[in-house]
Image (cartoon, grey):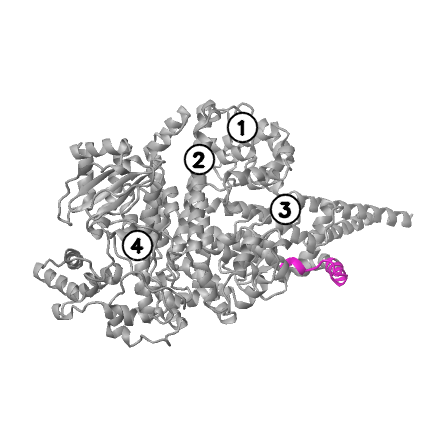
Amino acid sequence: MKLKLIISTFILCFACVVFANEEECETTEDSFASNLAKEVGIPNCYTNMNLMMAKRGRTEKLCDECRQDFESRYPDRINSLSKSEIQARVFKASIEDYKKNLISNLVSVVRMRGLPPTGNNFDKSIKACQAPKQADLIANCSSPAAKALLSNTELFNKMQEAAANEVAKLVSPNPDFTPIPILLKHEKPSCAFPEKDVLFLYSLATEKAFSPTLIETLSSLDFKRFNSTFDIFQQNFENSQINLAEVYEGMKSHPVLSTKIGSPQEFLTFIKNIPRPLNENSLHQALYTKEHGEKIDQSIASNCTESLNTFKEAICNEQFENGNINLESFDNLSKISSLKLDPSSDELAASPDLLQANIEILRLCKTSFPEKAKNISELLNGITPGMDEIFKSQNLEKFSQDKFVQDIGKTQELVCSPEGKKACEENSQSFACQIYKGYENSKKKGTLEYSLANSSNKEVNTLLRHMIGDSSSIAPQTKVVLVEAGILPQSDGTMVAQADIPERQPGYFSKPSTNSAPAPVQKTTIASQPARASRNSQNSSPRQELYNPGAYYENHLASQMPDFSDLLDESDKNLRNVQDEIMRRLSGLPNQRPTSSAQAKQIARDSLKSKGISNSSLESALASRMMATSPSATSNSIPTGSADMFDGERKEVASTSTETAAEKYKKDGMNRALADMYGARQSAGGAGASAGARANGRSPASGPGDAESEKPLSTVALSVPADPRVSLHQVFAEKLNKNDPEAQMLKVLVTSRKNFILQIGQVNFRVVFDKASQMNILLDSGDKDEAQRIRPQLEIFINRLRSI
Amino acid sequence: MKQMLCLLLLLSSAWVFAEEECDETPSKIKPLLEVANAAAKSGCPNATGLTSLCMAITSGAKDSSGKYDFAYQKIIMEASCVTSSDSEASIGRKVNTMWKTFEERLVCETASFDVIKGNILKYAVSKRFEDFLFDAAMMWKVNLNRIDPSDGRTVLDYVKKELDKYKGTPSEKTLKSYYDMLKSSGAKHKSEL
C-alpha cells in the first residue's frame, strides 16, 4: 500500500513538474501575444513584429489571431478607401520618398564641403539636382489627378524648406542650432562639436585607417574571388586587428571612397592604382582627383535624376489616374499606412487612424500572402534604390532624424563623452580617437584640421544652392546660417566670402610633376614677394606643406595682404575689426586681390558697413591701399573675358617640382579660375552655344550647326539701380509684382526659349537655352564680380518669370 | 491527511523547481555551458566568422550566397554549425549555445556607436537594424541580459536611455517598439536582475 502510494505520488509530481515547466515556458514562447492581450485588450496588428513576421512569410499571428480578434470587435469598420483617397496617399508616399532621397543627396554633398576639392564644378549635378519646378512637373505629367495634386504650391515650398533646413542643420557652426525643434540634434550640448566638423573629421579618420599595410594587402587580392566589397573584408581580415565595422562604416560615408565600393573589381582596381611608394599622402593623391570629382558628379546627378523620375513615374501614369494601384502589394500598403502612423504597440487601436491602418494591413490576409512574401524585399529595394536598407521603410521625419543620428549624432556623443576620451587613451587608432584629436586640432591655428574647419568649398556651395532652389520661403534663422556659410546670397545678391586655402586648390594633394610644361598663362608676380622668397626653396617638402598648411596660410597668404593699420585707429576696436573684415573678403577673391578700383571700393564700403561705420574718405583710402598693394590687380589678374579662356580645351597652369607651395597655390588659383570658365563653356556647349566671349562684348559663337549662332542675339536691357546697397531681391520682386514692361519683355523671350543678351548696368549676360530647354545664364561681358553679385537673384527672377 | 500534506509539499517544491528552470538560474545554464564547452572543443560552434558580424550589421549586407536574407544570418548560422536539416527549435538551441560560448566577443566598437565595446544587440538598436533584433530576440531567443562593463547597462536599459533621449521625436515610436519586443522576449533592466 505504502509503495503504491509513493509511486502514485511520484507519478503525480512528475506530471506536475512537466506541466508546470511547460506552462511557464509556453508563456515565454508567446509572451508577446500574451502581454499584448493582457496589457491592451484590443489587438493592434500593425506592429513592427507582425510586419516583420509577415515579411518573412509568417502571417499566422497577423492573419489568424489578429484578424479574428479584430473582426470580432470591429466587424462593421472594414471598408475600402475611395479612389481619391488612394491617389492622395500614393502621392504623399511618393513625395516622402522623393524628399528622403533629396536629404540623402544633400548630406552626401555637405560631406564634401569640408574636404579638399576634386577639381570638379559639378555641372551635371547642378543640372540634375536643381529643385524641381512646379510648372515643369505639371506640364510634363499625363495624369489630371496628379496634376491637380501637384498644383499645391505649399508642397513645393515645403520641399525647399526641408532641403534648406537639412543643410543649415549640418553647416551651422553652432552645434545647438536646429531649424526644426522636433528634430532634436543631441541630448544636451555636451561639447561644442559642430556637425560640419564631425562630417569631415570622420572622412579624414577613414583615410588614415587605410595604412600602407592595408593597401598592400588589398592590392594583392583578385577581385574575381569576391561577390561584394563586404566579402573582401570578411574573407581577408577576419583575424586581423582591423576594426572591420569601423572601416566599412567609414568607407560608406566617405564622399569618394563610397563611390568605389560598388563592386570588388572597382574597389580593388582603385586600391591597386594608389601611387607608390605608399605614404601618408598616397591615398589623398588617389582620392582627390578630377576623375573622382567627375564620378561623384555623375553619381549625385544619377541619384537626383533617378529619384525625380521615380516620383514622376509613380504618379504620372494611367494606373494612378484610374486609381488602379495595386494595394495588395505589401510595400505599398505599409508605405501608405506609415504616413500616418508608425508601427507601435503603445497606440493600440486607440484612434480611428490606427483602426484604419489595421484594416489596411489585414487586407493582406485576403491574398495568399506567403507566396508574395518573397517579393517584398525585392519590392522595397526597388522603391528607394541606393538607399540604406535600414532607412527604406521609414517615413520622412523618422528617416531624417535617424539619418542624422547615424551620420553624426552618435559620433558626437561618443567623442564628447568621458568614456570616449578614456577609450582614446586605450586605443589611439580608433576612429573616435582620431576624430577627437582632429577636433582638438581644428581649434589650433596651423593645422590641416583648422584650415578645413574654417573654410569651405565654393563648388559644393554652388551645388547646394541649386539643390535648395528658391530661397524665398525659407525661415529667416535658417537663411542666416546658409548666407553665412556662403551657400545662399545675401540680400544684396553678394556672397559672404569663404576662406580659400591651399588644401582646397585642385591638385594640392597631387605629386609635384617634374615633367610639367611651362605655365601657359602669365606668371604671377607673387613669387617676387619677399615673404615667400624666403621660403622659395627646393627643400620645401610637400609633406611639410601638407601637415602645416595653417601656418603656411598665416605666414604667407596673410603677408600678401595689404596693411591698413596706419589708416585705422588702433584704439578703436571696431576699426581694428575692419582690417580683419577686409582680409576675410579679400581671401575669397582670386589672388586675394580686387580686380578693379570699383571692386576695391565696394569691399571697403561693405567692410566698414559690416562694422557699422560709414566714412567715405576712409573708404577711398582703404580702396586705394588695396589697389596700391595689388600688383596683380592690373597686369597679373586672371584676364576675365579673354577669348583664350573660352577657346579650345581647358589650359592648366602647370606645377613644377621646384616651385614653392605659394607659387603652386597661386597657379592652382588660376587653374581654378580657368576651371570655372571651362565649366561655363562646357555648360554652354551643351546648349549649342559656345561660351567664347568676344572682344566686342557681344554675342558668342555658338556650337556647330546652330543656325542661331550665326546671327547676333537681340539685347534686352533691365534697369537696376547702380547703388550696390539696393537689394536686388527687392528690385526684381517689384518688377514681378508691378508687371513691369521690362519683365514682360523678358518673359516673352524666356518662355519662347530664344537666346538673347541681357544688359544690366555695365554687365551683359548671355541667356541661352540648351536642347532640353534648360536655361543657362552666362557672363558675356563686364565686371565679373558685379556679375557674380547679380546672377543668383537674376536666376531666381527669370525662373519665376518662366513659371508664372 | 498525511498523504495529502506530503503531496502538497512535493507539488510545491516541484513548482518552485520548475520556476527556477524558466528563470534560467545557473542550474539551467550549467548543462548548456557544458554542452557549449564540449562543442567548442570539437570546433563547433566556432568564432571564425564572428569578427565581421558588426560589419554585417553596419552594412545591412545581403547574403551573397542567396541562402539567407542577410549576411549576418549566414555568419550566425555558420558560427552555430546550423545545417539545412535543422528544425527551427534546433536552430534556436544551436544559436543559443554559440551565443553563450562567445558572448564576450559579440561586441562592437565604432565611432558612430556610443558604447565602448557594447554588445551587438545594443549596436543593432543604435543602427535601428530591427531585422537582427527580431531574429535575436524572437527567433533565436538569445540571452538579452548581458551588462556591458563600459556603460553598466543591459540592452533594455540602453533602449530606455535612447527612448528618454528621443522622447517626443520621430524615433520614439521605433524605440518603444524595440522596448516592447525585447521586454516581451525576456529582456530585463539591470535593476531587475
Residue type for callout 2: Phe
Q: Which residue is mark 1?
A: A326
Residue type for callout 4: Ala
Q: Residues within 10 Å of mark 1 (few under 14, many from 20)?
A: few
Residue type for callout 1: Asn
Between the C-alphas of marks 1 and 2, the distance is 17 Å
| Residue A355, x across and y down, in percent | 51, 31
Image mark for residue B138: 3
Mark 4 or mark 1: name the one nearer the start of the chain: 1
Q: Which residues are magenta?
A: B32-50
Indicate the secondary structure of the residue bearing disc 1. loop
Left or right: A616 in relation to A58: left
> Are both tags, 4 and 1, on one chain?
yes
Between the C-alphas of marks 3 and 2, the distance is 36 Å
Q: Which residue is mark 4?
A: A485
Q: Which residue is mark 2?
A: A311
Q: Chain of mark 1?
A: A
Image mark for residue A297: none
Q: Chain of mark 4?
A: A
> Are both tags, 2 and 4, on one chain?
yes
Query: Is B152 situated above or below B90?
Result: below
